[in-house]
Amino acid sequence: MKNLWDKRAKNFPRYDKNLKEDKIIFDFFNAKEVNLKDKVILDLGCGNGRYALHLAKQARLVYAFDISSEMIENVRNDAKSHKIDNIECFCGDWNDFDVSRFLQPIDIVFASLTPALNSFEKFKKAINIAKEGMMYIGWGNKRESAFLEEIFKAHNAKLEIPVGAKDVEGYLKELNIELPEVKFITKNINKKKKFQDAISDAVFQLEMHNVEPNNSLIKDIITNKWLHNDMVEYVNIMEIGMMYIKN
């Protein structure tokens, strides 16, 4: 898993203070009156720090945690370039990570579309260390991509929806934690990639589904249908669910 995410680091989203998509997410939590000022926040599965740097501008301290050392290095570099000095980075597998390494008590856990919470035990571990609660963004009930679906079909596989908001609702019932309001939104994400980047994206998605990629087959599919003027363009449609879980 670590190797997969290390390879993904090159093309994974990075911090952009003007990204409208991120504003929608933070507006939701602001409406829930989540106060980040002077708080210690754990960004669990932080990726390249897309949200960690936003959080650090309000919080006292952000712990940025990810399984990928490449992504963690990108977080450090982006924090330095944006002159943000209240982020501490940790790399590891959440399943066996020793949380005592976080030297300050964590007020809020932030988790966005992360496989670090893809089981009840992992979720329980995260919610138990949050003094105040968890800002959670997870998959909803829709995931569509004509591009990926064609490639998956050629591999006799199906593009699945990862563990997400509906699963977390079940986790909360098991933990006897009050179910919060869940806001679902659908996003149409326009992708425009170079030929090799599109291949890498398809390979990554197949490997995440434990499917052995056939690179020759992928190249043929992209060349015959999806390649136009040296670029590959397609749309991914996804639903996400956002909730603030109070402890």
Image (spheres, rainbow, N blue to C red):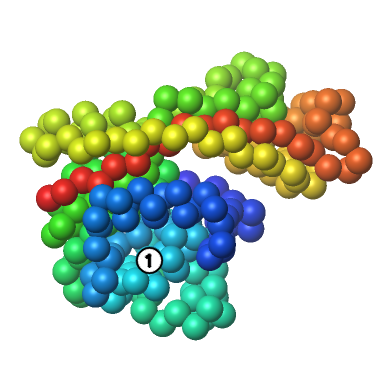
Crowdedness near tag 1: few (<14), some (14–19) or many (≥20) residues, C-alpha within 10 Å? many
Instruction: State the residue at coordinates (67%, 33%).
Output: 235
Relative to 231, is 153 above or below? above
Residue at the outermost front position: 31
Q: Secondary structure at mark 1?
A: helix
Relative to 198, is 86 above or below? below
Q: Position of residue 50 (x, y in %)?
A: 49, 60
Instruction: State the residue at coordinates (49%, 76%).
Output: 79
Q: Position of residue 192 (x, y in %)?
A: 74, 44
Find residue 98 and report its image quarter: bottom left
Front one among 210 and 40: 40
Find residue 123 and report its image quarter: top left
| Residue type indicated by callout 1 | Leu
Q: Can see residue 69?
A: no
Front one among 95 and 50: 50
Relative to 89, is 240 above or below? above
Report the residue marked by disc 1.
55
